[in-house]
Amino acid sequence: MIEVRDLVAGYDGTVVLDGISLSVEAREIVVIMGQSGCGKSTFLKHLIGLQKPISGDVKINGIDVAHMSEEDYRAFCRSVGVLFQSGGLFNSMTVGENVAFPLREHTKLAEPVVDIVVKLKLQQVGLPGIEGLMPSALSGGMRKRAGLARALALDPTILFLDEPTTGLDPIIGAGIDALILRIRDIYRATMVVVAHDIASSMHIADRIAIFRDNKLVELGTPEQIRGSPNPYVQQFLNRQPDRTDHPTESFGYLR
Amino acid sequence: MLKLVEGARDACLTAHDVGVLAWDSVRHAGYAVRRHKLLFRQLFEVGNSSLLIVGVFGLFVGLILVLYGGDQLSRFNQEKYIGLTGLAVVWEFGPVFTAFILAGRIGSAYAAEIGTMKVSEEIDALQVMGVKPEAYLAAPRLLACALMLPALVVYADFAAMMGGAGMAWVSVRVAPSEFFRVFFQYLEFKEMARSLIKAVVFGGIIAVTGCYHGFRTTGGAEGVGKSTTASVVHSLLAILVADYFISRILLAL
């Protein structure tokens, strides 16, 4: 379904991803984890064709994402849904207009039908009746769920979710986890999720990929990751800080 | 020396990127026409919302030009030719100063609006929904500016002429009928056309510069502020440079 081979990516001469190879099977949920700045979001941007690799390739259903024609890319976008870290909602539009946007761009549905689909999608993410609100009136969790409703508007077969539970309280986060699993079952969708939340990732993932210093250092099922002999993986899972010789040196002025 | 070379290289790269954006916007003009609501919103924003400021500005340009012009001409007892100051309005003051107003009011708003969309991932969201930002954001803005600026220039010219005619009567006792008679006697159609061609080009410069800086925005609120400032400064500079070259070309025709 998704095949990434020897992906090298970066900006202005700096390598951000170094030789990443990863495949995602149909209806699988793969969670990408790692420290901030290790290239997770950049990896996601390459999967959805927002950035072009320096070398290597990203193929989705056998088609190279980086070298699609404008027409092919438009067709590709019709089959994928993306949830951005901040929700990515258009702030100048109401929530309803946001969810309707892909429908109006890609289909010729009559307006009453668009309205019905919008209501249905918002209901699916647990936000019925908010189509008239502006994104600025929503809480963080609601913005993410509204973003998810927009990502689901065209019934995608592949979903890319960038930190869907980051910054949310545990109850809302657990709700979004349950929603992700339900969406996978209803839409029979393949998902790539970038996440920081270890408990959430262990719950929703079929496989977890751990990135470190721009490289993929571990890939496996949640059980395999838990039992990984890799010290960095264990440090990451157990939330242990990096060891330094003088950890409090910079606080000297407090003495 | 190295810095000079690097600066020249950066300027060339920027010019290339601006050119590509301009071409992409023109290429997707059909999209903007099909999404007529988008286009009308921009036309309204550029045209209707600028009427008051452009009108007041035009009026005072007319007042000031005739005030000084009348003073100079009266030294030679040639006050009756005060209507000729209107030609300066049509040639330069109308298109250039109206463009300056729009660069400050509209170009900066484009940079801020698109820049904010960029830092809040809205541009990325557009792209992954299969919509080209150049088509959805830049093309309607380019069309709106290129279409509305000539109309605003005619309106500014009219306001300036009204102000000028009034000031001619107050300062040098030339009747409005005489003011307009001299003006229309010497005004040629090609001068009016030249002014409107300039306005179309300036409108394009304002829209493309504003959108370009918006798309290039990085780094949150500070980045948006920098883009806004850069869009105004670069628009003003580009308008003056373009004015010189367009004038040279059109005068040679």
Image (cartoon, rainbow, N blue to C red):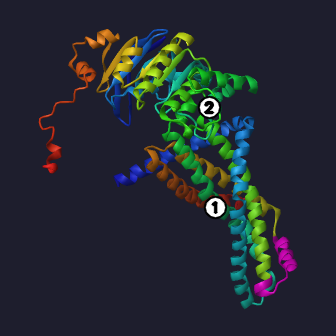
Category of crowding for the residue at label 2, using alpha-carbon neighbours closer than 10 angstroms: few (below 14), some (14–19), many (at least 20):
some
Q: Name the residue at the front extreme.
A: A171
Measuring from the top left, give residue A43's x and y in whole percent: 41, 25
Chain hosting mark 1: B
Q: Give the structural element (helix, strand or loop) at label 2.
A: loop
> Is residue A102 shown in magenta?
no
Measuring from the top left, give residue A42's x and y in whole percent: 41, 28
Q: Mark 1 points at which residue?
A: B101
Instruction: Determine if residue B27 is in view.
Output: yes
Residue depicted at 62% across the width and 28% down the height: A99
* Residue A117 picture quarter: top right
Look at the magenta stretch and give its main secondary structure: helix
Residue depicted at 30% across the width and 9% down the height: A224
B242 left or right of B79?
Answer: left
Three-letter amino acid code at the position of disc 1: Ile
Q: Is residue A3 above or below residue B126?
A: above
What segment carries the magenta color? B169-186
Which of A14/A36 is in front?
Answer: A36
B49 left or right of B128?
Answer: right
> Is residue B179 shown in magenta?
yes
Q: Mark 2 points at which residue?
A: A130
